[in-house]
Image (cartoon, rainbow, N blue to C red):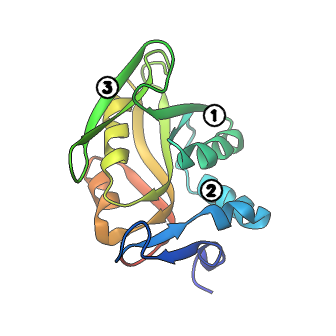
Amino acid sequence: MAENDDIRQRIRTIPDFPKPGIMFRDITTLLLDAEGLRLAVERMAAAVDGPVDLVAGIEARGFLFGAALAVKLGAGMLLVRKDGKLPGATIAEDYALEYGTDRIAIHADALAPGARVLLVDDLIATGGTARAAVRLLRKAGAHVTQASFVVDLPELGGADALRGDGIGVHALVAFDGH
C-alpha cells in the first residue's frame, strides 16, 4: 500500500464541482470516519518538526484539523478568519483571487512575538490564502516555518510557492488535477 493510501481512500472525489472540469476533493468523508480522522491527525502531528506554541487554522476546515492537532501537540489554537468575523482589534492581510481580492485577519493580541506557529488547513491548491496567512502571522511577530495539510494539489503550485516563502510543507496525500 502506498504511503497514506488509507487516508486517500477515505477522501471522496466529486467531478465537476463547483464547476465543470474541477475534481473536488471532499474531506467530509474522512471526517465522518473516526479511524481515518484519528490516523490523519496522528500522522500530521508526527510530521511536525519540533515544538510549536500555536497552531493557526485557516477558516473553516483548517479549524477542524488545527484544533485536533493543537490538542495533540499541547499547543494553543489561533483562528485565521475572513476579515470582519473576529470581535475586537484585528490585523489583516489582503490576497489576490482569480478575480479581485480577499482579506483574512487574526486578533491583534493573538500571539506573543517569536511564537512558534504551525499553519494548518485541509487542502493546499494555489496557496493564495496560505501565503497570506504566513505573511499575516509574520507581520504579527510569529516564527512560521512549517505548514501541514491533508491534501496537496501539486499541479496548482501552492505548496511550492510556500516553500519559496521559507515554509516546510507537509501533506498527507497529493492528487493530480484541479
Q: CA distance from mark 2 to mark 3?
A: 28 Å
Within 10 Å of the Cα at label 2, are there few (<14), some (14-19), or many (20+) other Cα atoms? few
| Whole-percent x, y for residue 126 in the image | 31, 58
- Residue 41, relative to residue 134: is it above or below? below
Q: Which badge, 2 or 3, is on the more N-terminal residue?
A: 2
> Which quadrant: the C terminus?
bottom left
Q: Is residue 75 left or right of residue 148?
A: right
User: What residue did someone put label 2 on?
Assistant: 46
Residue under numbered circle 1: 75
Decide which of tag 1 and tag 3 comes sooner along the chain: 1
Secondary-structure class at tag 1: loop
Q: Residues within 10 Å of mark 3 (few under 14, many from 20)?
A: some
Report, in whole angstroms, how far the alpha carbon at label 2 lies from the one at label 1: 14 Å
Inter-mark Cα distance, 1 to 3? 20 Å
Q: Which label number is shown at residue 44?
A: none
Could you say which is closer to the camera, residue 14 or residue 142? 14
Residue 170 lies, in percent from the top left, at 47, 59
Q: State whether residue 53 appears in this view.
A: no
Q: Residue at x 62, y 56 (%)?
A: 46
Q: Residues within 10 Å of mark 1 (few under 14, many from 20)?
A: some
Q: Amino acid at mark 1?
A: Ala
